[in-house]
Image (cartoon, grey):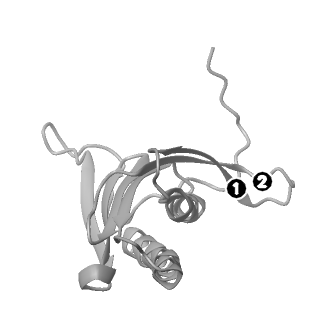
Amino acid sequence: MLVRRKAFVGQRRRFPGWPRQAAGKGSQVLMKIERVSLGEGRYALEAVVVRTQDGVNVCLGGGEKTHIGTVVLCQPRPSLKGDGKTSTTSSVLNLIGHKDGELARAFAEKLCRALNQTVVVTAGIHIESAAPQEIGYFLKAAEELGEKTIEVLLN
């Protein structure tokens, strides 16, 4: 049996220009796609964002080889501290030997809190024999890309 909570922190954010209901047969928008990127060459990072009517699916890739290394499912919920803020519950699935999880989880949780919607991020960023400073670059770049993505989705 599915039980829904009546009290939820905030309201789900509606995307600008999103129809509240279909304007007529065959005219309903089911999904919208956005591309957000930064950097170039070996340091490029790109998010392909699919906005549904009630959730966001992101394919995040970059480096020398994009791939699927991690999947994160993030759901908004009221903070357990009872402070009125929105928090998240996240599940992370990493493929063996992949280290994309930390970056993908932070990206997913940032979007989830800002949009107050369920977010799925599939991520794969690869640089052969990456130095610690290159990994640090991508962690910081993903944070910046998350901000840009939120801006695109809310404007």
Element at label 2: loop
Numbered-mark total = 2
Q: Nearer the viewer, residue 100 or 35?
A: 100
- Image coordinates for residue 107, horizontal then vertical, percent: 51, 64
**Pointer 1 local density, CA inside 10 Å: few below 14, some 14–19, many at least 20:** many
The residue that mark 1 highlights is 87
Q: In the rendered structure, which amino acid carries the disc numbered 2?
A: Ser
- Image coordinates for residue 113, horizontal then vertical, percent: 60, 61
Left-right relation of 38 to 54: left
The residue that mark 2 highlights is 79
Q: Quadrant of the C terminus?
A: bottom left
Q: Is residue 59 above or below residue 143?
A: above
Q: Nearer the viewer, residue 100 or 110?
A: 100
- Image coordinates for residue 83, horizontal then vertical, percent: 85, 60
Q: Nearer the viewer, residue 137 or 17?
A: 137
Q: Quadrant of the N terminus?
A: top right
Inter-mark Cα distance, 1 to 2: 5 Å
Q: Spot the residue most to the left.
A: 26
Q: Nearer the viewer, residue 150 or 53?
A: 150
Left-right relation of 40 to 86: left
**Pointer 2 local density, CA inside 10 Å: few below 14, some 14–19, many at least 20:** some
| Residue located at (65% from left, 29% from top) | 4
Element at label 1: strand
Q: Are marks 1 and 2 in contact (CB under 8 Å)?
A: yes
- Image coordinates for residue 77, horizontal then vertical, percent: 68, 47
Q: Tell me which numbered mark, 1 or 2, is placed earlier along the sequence.
A: 2
Q: Is residue 39 above or below residue 62?
A: below
Q: Which mark is residue 115?
A: none
